[in-house]
Image (cartoon, rainbow, N blue to C red):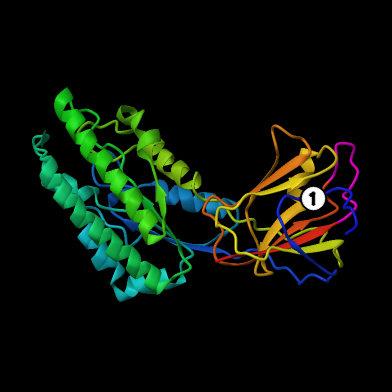
């Protein structure tokens, strides 16, 4: 095998002859359905008015990036419990939207606990941890049922299950506050486990939200956040979601210098490491390296030069992971060295995710 001037992939591959690539299309649009309670609707800390919440912020960002197809939060309802969520996803009108959705967010279950242990009239809280544990099992069961129904209707949808922030930071009784915080911590742990078991994404919000919970929940008599709090919920979603790249692939060669195929399927969170024999120009990596799924869809991978080795490039999976399918990693002549010199040998590497 002749020596490649600029690129050696640090894995074992089978090498094939040069071939002409397929015609590549741009990315698709995202149809987004937001499910859940008043937090999904965007209720304000004062009264019951529906305003701009975290689901609206998510949709606005997707629209700004020109990847939003449609968005609805009309099926989110104030006061909805986890049992209400199950009823919602079983409705024919809701299922019509879910079958077409690429993205579904769920925030549900907090009302089950609030209805049981919190008296909004006088602000009193009566927490019983054994009872809360039993209720958590019921909530988890309902959420699992709802998620299973969504995945049955649309196996390809990206489903994001939100955890809970601590909704009562104004409690003055220290012992009671710690007890309630423990209950919500246990609930979040179980929701994270549930999400992993059901094959959906978990959005952890407590760590970022609770550190400034009093500021985000500015009305001591209400559990809904202000806009700054809703922004945190949206930011935590994007910490787990890579926005699709809605632009074509430039400079795709008619023929590749080398074609490599990975014989075994790789993990959905696979990070590829590329070792070069010259220092890489960091500004060239986004235009010089691509990952494409099924010959049509450009994948929003993270590409960066290693902080410890300037001759090494790391290609990380999207935050939501690779979906099952066939992929091609392309290294083109638009990848430059530190002096502006191009890659002398282009590389196309094929891999599968099961």
Taking 252 as reference, is 102 left or right? Answer: left
The residue shown at (73%, 68%) is 24
104 or 47: nearer the eye?
104
**Looking at the image, residue 180 lies above or below residue 303:** above
145 or 227: nearer the eye?
145
Q: Quadrant of residue 16?
A: bottom right
Res. 119 visible in picture: no
The residue shown at (82%, 55%) is 332
**Looking at the image, residue 115 lies above or below residue 72:** above
Quadrant containing the C terminus in the rendered view: bottom right
Taking 332 as reference, is 182 left or right? Answer: left
Residue 42 lies in magenta, yes or no?
no
Res. 133 visible in picture: yes
Number of marks in the image? Answer: 1
- Where's residue 122, x and y in %? 8, 35
Classify mark 1: helix, strand or loop: strand
- Where's residue 4, x and y in %? 87, 52
157 or 247: nearer the eye?
157
- Where's residue 333, x and y in %? 86, 53
The residue shown at (28%, 72%) is 90
Q: Quadrant of residue 165?
A: top left
Quadrant containing the N terminus in the rendered view: bottom right
- Where's residue 83, x and y in %? 21, 61
Residue 343 lies in magenta, yes or no?
yes
Q: What stretch is highlighted in magenta?
A: 336-345
Determine which residue is flagged by label 1. Answer: 8
Secondary structure character of the magenta stretch overall? loop
237 or 93: nearer the eye?
237
Near mark 1 (Cα within 10 A), the count class, few <14, some 14-19 or many ≥20, is: some
């Amino acid at each position: 095998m002749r020596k490649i001037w600029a690129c050696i992939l640090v894995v074992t591959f089978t090498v094939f002859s040069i071939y002409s690539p397929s015609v590549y299309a741009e990315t698709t649009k995202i149809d987004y359905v937001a499910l859940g309670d008043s937090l999904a609707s965007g209720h304000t800390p004062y009264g019951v008015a529906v305003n701009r919440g975290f689901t609206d912020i998510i949709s606005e960002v997707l629209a700004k990036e020109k990847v939003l197809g449609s968005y609805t939060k009309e099926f989110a309802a104030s006061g909805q419990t986890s049992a209400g969520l199950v009823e919602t996803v079983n409705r024919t009108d809701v299922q019509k939207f879910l079958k077409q959705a690429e993205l579904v967010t769920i925030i549900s279950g907090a009302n089950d606990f609030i209805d049981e242990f919190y008296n909004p009239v006088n602000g009193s809280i009566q927490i019983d941890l054994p009872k809360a544990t039993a209720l958590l099992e019921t909530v988890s069961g309902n959420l699992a049922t709802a998620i299973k129904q969504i995945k049955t209707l649309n196996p390809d949808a990206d489903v994001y299950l939100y955890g809970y922030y601590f909704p009562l930071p104004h409690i003055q009784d220290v012992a009671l506050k710690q007890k309630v915080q423990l209950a919500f911590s246990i609930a979040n742990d179980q929701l994270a486990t549930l999400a992993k078991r059901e094959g959906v994404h978990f959005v952890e919000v407590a760590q970022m939200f609770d550190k400034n919970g009093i500021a985000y929940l500015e009305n001591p008599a209400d559990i809904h956040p202000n806009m700054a709090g809703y922004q945190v919920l949206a930011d935590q979603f994007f910490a787990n979601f890579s926005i699709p790249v809605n632009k074509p692939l430039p400079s795709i060669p008619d023929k590749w210098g080398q074609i490599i195929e990975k014989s075994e399927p790789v993990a959905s969170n696979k990070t590829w490491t590329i070792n070069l024999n010259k220092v890489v120009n960091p500004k060239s990596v986004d235009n010089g390296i691509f990952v494409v799924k099924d010959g049509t869809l450009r994948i929003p991978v993270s590409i960066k030069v290693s902080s410890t080795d300037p001759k090494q490039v790391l290609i990380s999976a999207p935050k939501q992971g690779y979906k099952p399918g066939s992929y091609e990693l392309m290294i083109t002549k638009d990848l430059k060295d530190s002096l502006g010199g191009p890659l002398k040998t282009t590389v196309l590497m094929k891999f599968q995710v099961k």
